[in-house]
Amino acid sequence: MSALGAVVRSGVRGRRTQTLVIALAALIAVAASVLGGSLLAVSGAPFDDAFARQRGAHLSVRFAADEVEPGRLTASGRAAGVSGAAGPFRTATVVPRSDGPGSGWPMTVVGRGDPGRAVDEVELVDGRWPARPGEIALAAGSPLPPVLGATVAFPGLPGGPAVTVVGVARSVTDTADAWVVPSQMPALTAAGEDGEGNGGYQMLYRFAEAATAAQVAAGGASVTAGLPRGAVLGRQSWLTVREAVARDTAVYVPFLVAFGALGLVMSVLVVGNVVASAVGTATRRIGVLKAVGLTPAQVVWAYMGQALVPAAVGTALGVLTGHLLAVPILAEAGEVYGTSSLGVAPWVDGAVVAGVLGLVTVTAWASAWRAGRLRTVDALAVGRAAPAGRGRRAARLAGRLPLPQPVALGLARPFARPARALAMGAAVLFGTVAVTFTVGMAGSLGRVMEARAHDVADVVVPGPRPGPGADGPRSDEPPRVDPALVAGAIEATAGTARHYGAAKVRATVPGVSGVVDVVAFTGDASWGGYAMVAGRWFERPGEAVVPTPFLAATGTRLGDTVTVHGPAAPVTVRIVGEVLDPRKDGRQVFTDASTLAAARPDLSETSHHIAVRPGTDVSAYVRELNGRLAPSGVAAQAGGQGGGSDMVLTLNALSVSLTLMLVAVAALGVLNGVLLDTRERVREIGVHKALGMTPRQTVVSVLTSVAVTGLVAGAAGVPLGMLLHGWVVPTMGEGAGLRFPGSVLAVYHPAEVVPLAFGGLVIATLGALLPAGWAAGTRTATAVRTE
């Protein structure tokens, strides 16, 4: 084995370029596969563990108190398919007042005597469970800060009841924002200023079968059978919550699968090409190894080892890189449910390492098998030059073209070694696919961010912000501004083409956990950058558009109605459109301000968005408008209010990094092939130099030898990259709970496609530069004497 080890070490050290290419290709394949596999395997693990531990509810349903009796709800817990039920619990949508953020936002409070055991055991994070009226336990995700001892008041209810925070708890399926004892609920469900009560009932169910949406829906139909029409205000499936939890990590998986597959294919191509080239160019050396006593099996193992050693190093580095990338992404999900920081599952490491090294081994064996079959005498007698006659016809045809002789020689060269040219072309092909895919994904993510910003306005007047009070000290409350006065100033300013106002109203919607932002528009906002996925923009009061995740969370579709519980009276809206909006997990409703008239929303913090007429100087417009707005305490600014996204930044950074590595592998693959080619024909190069070929012409000849390969591979790689983009981006959207309109996918323009097609030529040229420089710098006498 010592002799075999020496051969392997000699081959690894002597072929540094090939060693680097194999290691880098294995690193990319393993890193992307480990990261993608680990995210796919454990993204839902924190939720699953917490759900099993707390016996979470498969379905939570909110019922109207005036439509159904508590006794009928209790009986629903014995319906077919129900394995456990809790409730009915009295519920209320209230608007609390407290020190700190979240004050004034509606929240859902449930009357519950204890944390429960059989269904939806609420886990205490801090403090204790409320034991008497006047105490409240806040959910860990409540809009109010979870500070023990804080006082929460409800001034909008009769008597202005107030409670003290005694605990912080967590329901695995977000069944409430806070809990109080049942005897506290009458004070929270009493008729407020609007003259109507806002109470209801909550039932929590576990089903014998609830692994799929269809099974949960069947269970829901069973427990609501026979109830009056309108009794159900909203429902929430545990699968919807689980999907929302896994959404942030699941979005990465299709993207990483694509890069992992590209890296894996590149690894196989590189290893096969490197080993086959090593065997083909070392025929005489193989004969010497056999002559000194190595068996055919040992020769095969020697060349396999020269591929496996760098592949093993690249695999180890890839595992480390995958771990470093995966842990931060998974850590947040672990913290949400109180579990320990997540790492990569050992079986993912084992499967990826075994898969990559297994493919490398099989590929290397297939390429090295020829070395073991060579007879010693034949191997010693065979040189390393290309077989006589191969490529001569192509050389004669190229010579007849009206081209300089170095160019003609280069164009004919791929036909002398067609297998090697094909291997280089494959490397360039996948490099071009990666570049095309990355360019397309960057464009698609940019379109998603445009839809996320929802602002293509030329000028924006942001809503009022806290500032100095009348006497100088800073005020924590923003100044109150009449949006009608701001709108009047905008209309009076020369150059205004159109404008609209937008104000956020915090509300709750049965079936959607947490606070929902109801965006109330004054004026036509359909031009403001809202990308419609389906349906249409609202046209009259009572209509609304919502994001895709909202439809999934509420189990609604276009044409259905939902009830929004705002600061005052509940408001029912009909969904007429589906809009692309990745913010707030879809907890948004977009409607006309007049729709919320009954809820009496506070519109004093309305922002205004303006499109100016063509040819208008935006800076001059802003100055004139600010002169009119000076008494109002608000100011206009040019441009929209777009924002970035950590996920988009991460995806862009990952895609650029992985693409650069794949391009580097492709260029190194070309370098390896051209280097072998120039070393094979070093004597031929010396003869050409002796006949008058200059170093510059030598460089041109070598670079031209990869030009056709690069152009063909680039032209083929662009449509393949576009196809990959067309599959991955929608799949990523599904992982994020979004549907993309056609505008998000149609990001390739002819002006971009043509340069991308030439990207293959650039990759091939980059890979051939070093061997071309080496060939040009070789002395003529040295080259001619080389055997």
Image (cartoon, grey):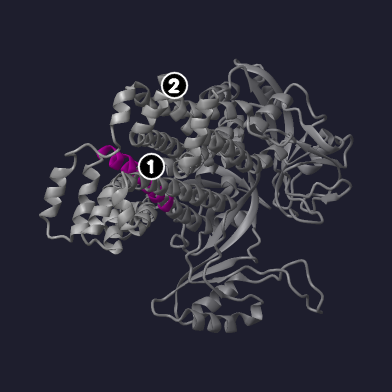
The span from disc 2 to disc 1 (Cα, nearest Å) is: 50 Å
Which residue is rendered at x = 47% and y = 56% of the image? 446
> Contact, CB < 8 Å: mark 2 with mark 1?
no
Q: Which one is closest to the eye, mark 2 or mark 1?
A: 2
The residue indicated by pointer 2 is 293
Which of the 4 image quarters holds residue 629? bottom right
Q: Quarter holding the C terminus?
A: top left
Q: Please report the residue visible at 15 percent of the width from the left and 44 percent of the height from the top.
A: 392
Comparing 611 with 353, the one in front is: 353
What amino acid type should be assigned to the residue bearing mark 1?
Answer: Leu
Q: Give percent across and percent down for residue 54.
A: 73, 26
Measuring from the top left, give residue 157's x and y in whole percent: 78, 49
Q: Is residue 39 left or right of residue 539?
A: right
- Is residue 706 something that shows in the picture? no
Quick one: label 2 or label 1, which is nearer the N terminus?
2
Magenta span of residues = 418-439
| Neighbour tally class for label 1: few under 14, some 14-19, many 20 plus, Cα within 10 Å | many
Residue situated in front as seen by the camera: 253 or 707: 707
Residue 481 in view, yes or no: yes
Q: Which mark is residue 724?
A: 1
Q: In this orientation, which residue lies closer to the viewer: 348 or 293? A: 293
What element does badge 1 sit on? helix
Disc 2 element: loop
The correct choice, above or below, for 34 with respect to 441 in the image is: above
Q: Quadrant of residue 49?
A: top right
Residue 353 located within the stretch drawn in magenta:
no
Q: Which mark is residue 34?
A: none
- Judged by its main secondary structure, the magenta piece is helix
| Residue located at (54% from left, 62% from top) | 642
Neighbourhood count class around disc 2 (C-alpha, 10 Å): few under 14, some 14–19, many 20 upward: few
